[in-house]
Amino acid sequence: MSIEHLVILAPGLLGGSVARAARARGLAGRITIWARRAETREALRGQPWCDAVAESPEAAVRDASLVVLAAPVTSIIELARQVGPQVAAGAVVTDVGSVKTRLCHEARTAMRAGVVFVGSHPMAGSEKTGWENGSETLFEKRTCFVTPHPDTPGAAVRRVADFWRDLGSMVATLTPEQHDEVVAHISHLPQAVATVLADTLAGRPGEWRHLAGGGLRDTTRIAASDATMWVEIFQQNRDHVLRALERFSGQLQDFQAALANHDWPAVRRQLEQGKVWRDGFRP
């Protein structure tokens, strides 16, 4: 797949990685980027994977073939409203947002006639942030959700799905609502658990962390993620995350009760069930 003109708006880690990967794989004839801050735009001008830096998002999208909205979730909606009327007719617009239901509805509505929005969510984040930490290999062998509306033209869906495959991703197609339920369990719940675990340990002597083995470091790695970004994600997917937390709390209470009651068969059962699930990850 070759994209005549790839435009990336408000790049952070994911947007910077999209640009790097697209250039490394020869997927785009031209890559134009717009960033909110003037100093960021100036820094981007010196990057080999950026052909042009636009001074406004509207100017960036006027002759785009594919537009990637790479801002945080709530900012993506604002950006879609801002550029939707200006995007070149025939272009496809996608995003990298972590929550899809409201975003996809708002973004679809914002597009002018002749422009199609297809939601995307690459599961390729990191505890690091910023376009400077992007990597051309970030999407390799990672899942990317593509979340079309039932009425979205198939050609536009294929275009977006092929783009992510060409970046190295494994594409899964879900409705926006299905996506939000799934990621509440496989992404947002783990973030909440890691954060609360780290916060719990923060109340204990600080030197304890230096006595821990690799398991604690692995388990709490994502607790180092950007708080502002995650507040927005939890706000957008609140209902699904609450249901996931209720299920988790029930399991945790069962484990606590088994431990308190010396019910070692029940403790073993949860340990073994957890191991079976964890062992099921593909290599």
Image (cartoon, rainbow, N blue to C red):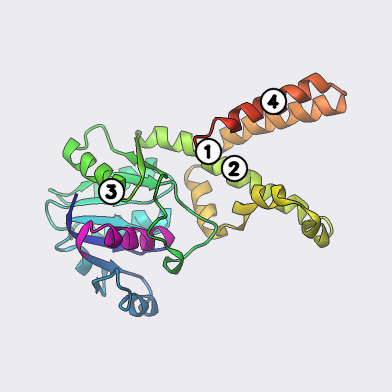
Q: Residues within 10 Å of mark 2 (few under 14, many from 20)?
A: some
Q: Which residue is mark 3?
A: 166
In the picture of the structure, the residue carrying the numbered disc 4 is: 272
In the shown orientation, is residue 65 left or right of residue 189?
left
| Residue at mark 3 to residue at mark 1: CA–CA distance | 24 Å
Vertical side of 26 occupied by 179: above or below: above
Q: Which tag, 3 or 2, sits closer to the chain's start?
A: 3
User: In screen coordinates, is 260 left or right of 83?
Assistant: right
Alpha-carbon distance for marks 2 and 1? 7 Å
Q: Is residue 209 left or right of residue 125?
A: right
Label placed on residue 168: none
Instruction: For the residues labelled 3 and 1, say whether their Cβ atoms are less than 8 Å apart.
Output: no
SS label for mark 4 = helix
Residue 29 image point, x, y percent: 17, 62
Under mark 3, the amino acid is Asp
Q: Nearer the viewer, mark 3 or mark 2?
A: 3
Give the labeled residue for mark 2: 190
Type of amino acid at the residue the image marks with label 1: Ile
Q: Residue at x 41, y 36 (%)?
A: 179
- Label 4 Cα crowd, 10 Å radius (few <14 / some 14-19 / many 20+): few
Q: Nearer the viewer, mark 3 or mark 1?
A: 3
Q: Is residue 70 magenta?
A: no
Q: Which residues are magenta?
A: 13-30
| Picture quadrant of residue 266 | top right
CB atoms of marks 2 and 1 within 8 Å: yes
Q: Residue at x 29, y 68 (%)?
A: 49
Q: Residues within 10 Å of mark 3 (few under 14, many from 20)?
A: some
Total label count? Answer: 4
The label number, if any, that marks residue 186 in the structure image: 1
In depth, the one of 88 and 139 nearer the eye is 139
Query: Cα distance, mark 3 to mark 4?
Result: 38 Å
